[in-house]
Amino acid sequence: MRGRFITFEGGEGVGKSTQARMLAAALEARGHRPLLTREPGGTPGAEAIRTLLLDPAQSFGPASETLLFAAARADHVAEAIEPALAAGRWVVCDRFLDSTRAYQGGEGGLTDADICTLHAVGSRGLLPDLTLLLSAAPEQVADRLAARDGDNSDRIGGRPADYHRAVAARFAALAAMEPERFRVIEATGSPEEVHARIMAEVEALA
Ligand SMILES: Nc1ncnc2c1ncn2[C@@H]1O[C@H](COP(=O)(O)OP(=O)(O)OP(=O)(O)O)[C@@H](O)[C@H]1O
Ligand SMILES: Cc1cn([C@H]2C[C@H](O)[C@@H](COP(=O)(O)O)O2)c(=O)[nH]c1=O
């Protein structure tokens, strides 16, 4: 039986990586052998593209930035995600297509339709079974981010607050457009409290 594909989405510092690790551990405790992975990245080639994309010393126009995310994803899907799903493993991925739609869509580069076309060509249109959108106001996670990053934001995380507000609005719009795939998870409270909300959604999937 094909495995399940679960993605975590949301803005900077809302707790996606923390919750992805907690979900993978919970699945392991239930006897699964999940693949825990991330974007951009997850394969040697995609990790190399990640280094380029997040390097503050690099500069890309909106279209080239979008194409690089799509190229990294195509490699990740072909080399890691699809083989794991085909082998019956669950895949837990920290960011995926919806991050490109929210971060690069509407920024003067490619349209949402263009991004979905690229995904159809590069990654055979693979969509998650469940997308967990972690939601918290930027001011609610500002302390977390400051403690984790200090002044060391990457090329995209370091963009102005207005950009990140627009990203949050696009995530919310995507979740409203696809309620069958998305679950919006309140990301405030302790990691354990957020994890319990997530497990309630994952139980419903299994
Ligand atoms: N529920 C929580 N309460 C308090 N701190 C948290 C919580 N969840 C995560 N953190 C801490 O906040 C910081 C950001 O969390 P994490 O790296 O999981 O977020 P993220 O969404 O993956 O961020 P980014 O997209 O910027 O990589 C980390 O230092 C983490 O330990
Ligand atoms: C997949 C993807 C990511 N981004 C941005 C979002 C973040 O600023 C970085 C990734 O860093 P993280 O610490 O691993 O969350 O990249 C993006 O703009 N578009 C995408 O498709």
Image (cartoon, grey):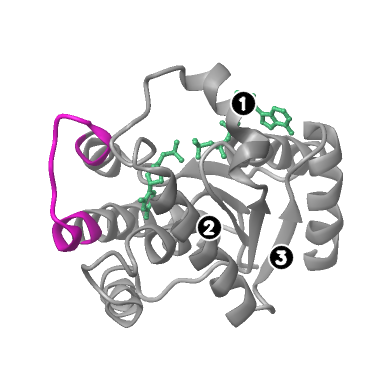
Amino acid type of the residue tagged 3 in the rendering: Arg
Relative height, residue 177 to residue 96 (above, below): below
Q: Tell me the number on the disc at residue 183.
A: 3
| Residue where numbered disc 2 is placed | 168
**How far apart are the two marked residues, 1 and 2, measured between alpha carbons?**
17 Å
Residue sitting nearer the eye, 113 or 181: 113
Task: Write down the region rendered in magenta.
Answer: 52-66
Of helix, strand and loop, which one carries label 3? strand
Mark 1 Cβ and ligand 1 under 8 Å apart: yes
Relative height, residue 148 to residue 186 (above, below): above
| Residue where numbered disc 1 is placed | 144
Residue 188 sits inside the magenta stretch? no
x and y percent of residue 135 in the render?
A: 67, 52
Snapshot quadrant of residue 154: top left
Left/right placement of residue 131 relative to residue 53 reads right
Q: Residue at x 19, y 37 (%)?
A: 52
Residue 55 sits inside the magenta stretch? yes
Can the viewer see residue 30?
Answer: no
Residue sitting nearer the eye, 89 or 205: 205
Q: Residue at x 45, y 55 (%)?
A: 81
x and y percent of residue 74 in the render?
A: 29, 60
Of helix, strand and loop, which one carries label 2? helix
Left/right placement of residue 180 relative to residue 43 reads right
Amino acid type of the residue tagged 1 in the rendering: Arg
